[in-house]
Image (cartoon, rainbow, N blue to C red):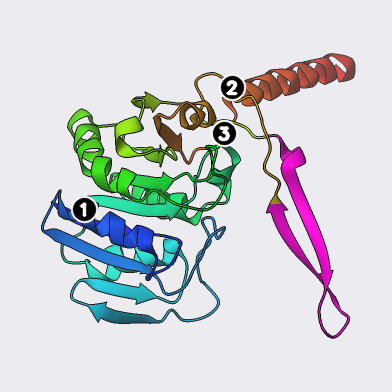
Amino acid sequence: MRILLTNDDGIDAPGLDVLRKIAGELSDDVWVVAPESEQSGASHSLTLHEPLRMREIDERVYAVKGTPTDSIIMGVRFVLRDAPPDLVLSGVNAGQNMADDVTYSGTIAGAFEGNLLGIPSIALSLAYGSGKDKTRKLKWQTPLALGSDLIRKLLDIGWPHDAVLNVNFPDREPDDIAGIAVTGQGRRNQDSLTIEDRMDTRGKAYYWIGFRRGRATPGAGTDLQAISSGQISVTPLNLNLTHEGAAKELAAALEKQEDNSARITG
């Protein structure tokens, strides 16, 4: 099995080293094409208005001066064009990617791009600061211990060709994991969104966007609840953003309006 890895934390990120070890337990044909620098929050953006630069760092390891999406495109359509990968893994992200995060996450975007190119794809992230210790002390040993076995199980089961699996590991030691939960995408309270305004040394304003931590009650069956409960969350995601219910209601309402207009004019 040929596996292509990427991330959004950059080619030197510790999570990518963890992912390489996980993938190495699954196959001896592992390739890395990842961003040269951190691309957190890049979402599904790609570079169109300037050339891409790529350098070979080691055997089967490449850094792209671009986004996770750029990296997957370069990996599938250029580096591995003669023998495309059988699986794309993106991560392991330093921090959870759940709920609203999925629309911002470069980690998930890398998996989405793999899916668009016809390759089964999984995004992996590791939560931190969700227990008593609120510091950014990541338990890399958890995905390292459990990641390859989980991926084997998912591959054995299989999933729809148009779905991407979004895996989040909780902020717990491997022996303290409370199981695996297949979840739905949650929704956060956006009141936690903050903007901090500051002044630079020249007296000009600049701003930091961030999120204030606080207690919340996650919805039942969501990724947020699973992580809060110490479970590994597996969320099948789909790039089709159509709201089917709204589409049916709008179509029926418009048809009714057209019928009424026809009767009036007739």
Q: Name the residue carrying label 1.
A: 23
Question: How would you rate the neighbour count of disc 1 (Cα within 10 Å): few for under 14, some for 14-19, many for 20 or more?
Answer: many
Q: Quadrant of residue 29?
A: bottom left
Q: Quadrant of residue 163?
A: top left
The percent coordinates of residue 172 (x first, y second) are 40, 38
The numbered dot on residue 242 is 3
Depicted 263 relative to depicted 20: above or below: above
Q: CA distance from mark 3 to mark 1?
A: 34 Å
The percent coordinates of residue 167 (x first, y second) are 39, 39
Please identify the residue farthest to the bottom as the structure is shown: 202
Q: Residue at x 32, y 82 (%)?
A: 55
The percent coordinates of residue 129 (x first, y second) are 53, 44
Q: Name the residue carrying label 2.
A: 219
Nearer to us in this view, 253 or 166: 166
- Locate residue 91 relative to residue 175 in the image: left or right: right
Question: How would you rate the neighbour count of disc 2 (Cα within 10 Å): few for under 14, some for 14-19, many for 20 or more?
Answer: some
